[in-house]
Image (cartoon, rainbow, N blue to C red):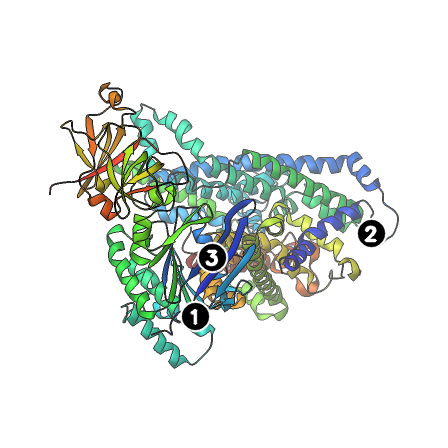
Amino acid sequence: MPWLVLAFLVWLVGYPLLVVAAEAFGIGSPDGGGPTTEAFRSFFTRADEWNAMWRTLWISVLSTLAAAAIGVPLGFLFERNEIPGRRLLGALVALPVALPPLVGVIAFLFLYGESGLAARGLQTLGLDVSWRLTGAWAILLVHAYSMYVYFYLFTRAGLSGQDGAAIEAAQSLGASRRQILFRVTLPRLRPALAGATLLTFMTSLGSFSAPYIFGGGFRVMTTQIVASKLNGELRMAYVETTMLALLAFASLLLLRRIDPGLDLASGARGTPPARRRLHGQGARVAAAAGGWVLAGVLLLPHATLILMSLVPPNTWTVEAFPPVLGLVNYGELLSSAERLRPALNSIWMAAAATLAAVVVGVMAARLSLRRGGLPGRALEAMMTLPWAIPGTVFALALAAAMSVNAPWVGRFVLVGTLWILPLAYLVRSLPLTGRSIFAGLRQLDPRLEEAAASLGAGSLRTVLRIVLPLLRPAVIAGAGLAFITMLGDFVTSIVLYTYDTRPISIEIQSSLRIQETGIAAAYGVLLMLLSAAAFIAWDDRAGGRL
Amino acid sequence: MTASGVSVRFDDVFKAFDDTVVLAGVSLTVEPGEIFALLGPSGSGKTTMLRLLAGFEQLDRGRLLIADEAVEHLPPARRGVGMLFQSYALFPHLSVAENVAFGLKVRGGAQGEANARVAEMLELVRLSGFEQRRIAELSGGQQQRVALARALAPRPRVLLLDEPLSNLDPALREETRADLRHTVKQTGITTVLVTHEQEEAFELGERIGLLNEGGLEQVGGPAELYRDPASRFVATFVGRCSVLSGVVLERHGGDELTVRLESQPQAEPWLCRGDSGLRTGEQVDVCVRPEALELSTDGGSGLAGRIEAERFTGSNSFYTVRLASTRSDAGDGSAAGPAIEVAMPGTAASLSGACVVRQLAGEPPSVFAGASTESDP
């Protein structure tokens, strides 16, 4: 049994990566020809390829720094100070994490784009300003905006786990506030910050929506890969895919070195220090106002998206603010079966992938943790691998591996069928469900299963009656995250979708292309609402983690 | 309540984890209906014996028999063994009644029958009326009783108890111990219990197997282990005991004999119990329990030493006395603490087995003596 599950995971996760690397060298490709390093040679000699590689790297470094610069102070502000409305504001500030990247990107476009709400507003005030939201700075802006949440949440978690007694000890030893920050608080925050750095950097490395919408001629690896594929330069696309996978691996290995272990709960857990209260009415009002302004700025893009979804087609031309608002776009979206199709596609594909990822996750986790050894470690590695590899890489790898009919080497023609996209979503869901199921099962007393066995229960009954009910919070947490992520997926979909399986993100993109901004915005809002609903249900059932 | 018990036999059982030998060829027979306690320090292999019997571990060599039938190849579900886990391992998402019914439902059978059995079991552990409670709502002692009821409900042939009381408050332990013994005896089931606490083994076990480093040191009733330890390990693990070297001075009638202690030959000889095979002049180990000794400061003919430590437990005080290596050392002040004499008054010690003369296998004797005095209330 462990070998069967392992074989399936290797086929689904590891094998496509090998196929894409092999085909980059011309091995086993359907167009014949012997092994060759020609494509790699041309990759290393073409300036645009090198540029894409280099840009991917520095964009990721700067995105991480920018996200840390926003997220860490915000984390301190909300965790260490008692400001009015702290709980609500603290939750609102974390909201961008629950929203699909593409929705954030188009919301930015509508707000800060060259004909966006902000530009129009300033022009109405008589200011002769114009700008183009494009290139590296636009990507950085969107990244910083959507990824600071990682640093914010990790900082808060790290701070809330710290023992106030350590600070009191430092105070009694005569340390100043500054010394305490740099010598007590920050060093102990290191695991949290290392975790946030890893998450932000890897997300940024694989980011696709922002570079795709705002990049223009500025290409990073993910957009370069998709462009090569669209241009029919398949082998070059495979070379780029291989290179991006290697870059991701190398980054992961390097970043893990700064990570002293993600164990936030290690050491004595005491009571966190009391929050600082603001003295004086003025200070409190100022803090509250500042907080709400901040939340307003952070939520403005999404408010804009909602506004845009209410603008009927061809009614807004030169005015600063749309003159007509209504539900026309939603009516259009809901009244036509063809328009509604993408939403239903997204829902069923995300649900199917999530369900499959839960089943595979439970099987893999049980086998891995109960049997241990080499197959155990291999199972866990296969479940985690898709997390470290950008979605574009997996999309290309599956596209390469599953476009050839060679059942004897495990290759089937799935590209262009109904199955390829749910399968790709499954791969991307595995680490999300796997991580929480593995963690949940690790906390489960193995004696419970022994007790069931000694009372006469077989393996299946033990799983259904004991393991699954007790793993419910972990399963819901992992499944919720996977479902939300796959519902808004753009990066794998754009490579693998067919007309019949086109998801919401693809529909948003094509609406934008034909200038149906209202429809695109309405889809964006729909996605936002679906994600929010799933998120609220998940957060509620998972025990209110936010 | 249950049909009379069955026998359990370990036959030359060998088990190793990686390169660590945990059980090195253990043979043991537990009689039908008996409560047998496996006692030993952690790492001695006692839990492994229990888990082998339950089927959670596979043995490397040897045989396991329940009612004279080999079970080593059977999965846990088919061994007819009920287990009370140290952590209880109650299913937290099921109610009390659902927990107890779990093993019955698995076997199928009529709902009404199962309900009746659940009610009967809950009555046995005095938890009638708790059917619909959640596990988290129960106290530690109640949880332990639910776990017992759950293990007994499917009418197992053998009951296994893994450190059944270690998760309870010390205050509750004594009461629960008597309760547990009563309940188990009432069912008449053959029971194997694992514990590292001597008191628990003595009070629950009808016979005790003392394990050390993967082998059985001694098997016997509580009194036998206390009065006739077969090895230095048994002597020191079961109760407090100081082991000193001595020489047999004179044999008396029965199994009484006097010994002279080697370190201080001038001191008054002790009257102890010993094997009839021991001859005059033979080198022996003297195992003496604190209750046999008396401390005095009036310079009598006892063993001279200095008090190194005192431990006051309420009803008793325990003293650790470092004996002077010869009598003349006594006054040189090299050891800290006040000077003291250790003596053995009368013949009570030989009668109660508080002083035993043996030739014991194991480490050489220490130069410490323990003594206890009853404190005045």
In the rendered image, residue A537, in percent from the top left (x then y), is placed at 45, 60
Work out whether residue B108 or residue B345 is closer to the camera in this orientation and state it: B345
Work out whether residue A336 or residue A166 is closer to the camera in this orientation and state it: A166
State which quarter of the image contains the C terminus of chain B.
top left
Q: Mark 3 lies on which chain?
A: B
In the rendered image, residue B317, in percent from the top left (x then y), is placed at 19, 38
Q: Is residue A89 found left or right of A376 in the rendered image?
A: left
Mark 1 neighbour density, 10 Å: few (under 14) some (14–19) many (20 or more) = many
Please tell me whether mark 2 sits on a helix, a strand or a loop.
Answer: loop
Q: Is residue B46 visible?
A: yes
Please tell me whether mark 1 sits on a helix, a strand or a loop.
Answer: helix
Residue at 40 percent across and 36 percent down: it is: B363
* Residue type indicated by callout 1: Gly
Work out whether residue B34 or residue B93 is closer to the camera in this orientation and state it: B34
Q: Can residue A315 be seen in this view?
A: no
Residue highlighted by disc 1: B103
**For the residues marked 2 and 1, what is the alpha-carbon distance in whole angstroms?**
57 Å
Q: Residue A213 bears which disc, if any?
A: none
Work out whether residue B261 or residue A135 is closer to the camera in this orientation and state it: B261
* Residue type indicated by callout 3: Arg
In the rendered image, residue A460, in percent from the top left (x then y), is placed at 54, 67
